[in-house]
């Protein structure tokens, strides 16, 4: 990831730690061979993948769920929440979202049904990611707060 994406990743971890303090929050948390951008470890496992400008975001979803299906990692937790956080890069100018995002969400939703106690949620991060060397938009922190609120609600709605 670039410098701006790393700033967002760090802020996301910090804010999730405040919103969900019962979890221990990590950046680049290893799930098998896959480093997850932000992860919360507690009674449940929360895995947050930040999709900044990835050409194939469905690949992240598949790798995570394949690891959960092929190992006993999921059984170590009361639940596993996989959240894919999509930047505005995946939005279409005409409205709606790109096929890349729709495919990733489709795969995540379907595969989550095959892993006991797993959930999948696609969340929009209201940031149009800058190109290499560009600056984050002025209200990027507010966009992270909105995303953290959504992730928090998803993780706590089963309680």
Image (tube, helix red, strand yellow):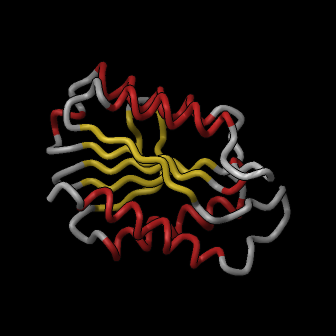
Percent coordinates x, y for residue 106 in the rendering: 49, 31
- Pick out the residue farthest to the front: 94
Q: Which residue is at a point 55% across and 34% down the rendered structure image?
A: 104
Q: Which residue is at a point 29% across and 69% down the rendered structure image?
A: 20
Residue sitting nearer the eye, 90 or 96: 96
Q: Is residue 70 above or below residue 60?
A: above
- Pick out the residue farthest to the top: 70
Q: Identify the image quadrant of residue 139.
A: bottom right
Q: Is residue 108 above or below residue 125?
A: above
Residue sitting nearer the eye, 127 or 24: 127
Task: Give the number of callouts.
Answer: 0
Q: Is residue 95 found left or right of 30 in the rendered image?
A: right
Q: Which residue is at a point 39% across and 23% down the rendered structure image?
A: 66
Q: Is residue 90 found left or right of 10 in the rendered image?
A: right
Q: Which residue is at a point 50% across and 37% down the rendered structure image?
A: 105
Residue sitting nearer the eye, 116 or 131: 116
Percent coordinates x, y for residue 120 in the rendering: 38, 42
Percent coordinates x, y for residue 145 in the rendering: 49, 74
Percent coordinates x, y for residue 28 in the rendering: 48, 49
Q: Is residue 29 found left or right of 140 in the rendered image?
A: left
Looking at the figure, which quarter contains the C terminus? bottom left
């Amino acid at each position: 990831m670039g410098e701006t994406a790393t700033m967002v990743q760090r802020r996301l971890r910090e804010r999730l730690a405040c919103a969900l303090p019962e979890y221990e929050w990590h950046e680049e948390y290893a799930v098998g061979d896959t480093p997850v951008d932000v992860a919360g470890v507690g009674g449940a496992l929360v895995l947050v993948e930040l999709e900044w400008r990835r050409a194939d975001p469905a690949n992240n979803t598949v790798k995570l769920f394949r690891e959960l299906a092929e190992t006993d990692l999921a059984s170590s937790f009361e639940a596993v929440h996989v959240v894919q956080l999509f930047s505005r890069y995946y939005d279409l100018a005409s409205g709606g979202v790109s096929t890349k995002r729709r495919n990733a969400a489709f795969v995540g939703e379907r595969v989550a049904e095959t892993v006991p106690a797993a959930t999948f949620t696609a969340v929009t991060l209201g940031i149009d990611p800058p190109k290499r060397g560009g600056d984050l938009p002025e209200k990027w922190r507010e966009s992270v707060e909105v995303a953290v609120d959504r992730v928090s609600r998803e993780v706590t709605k089963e309680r």
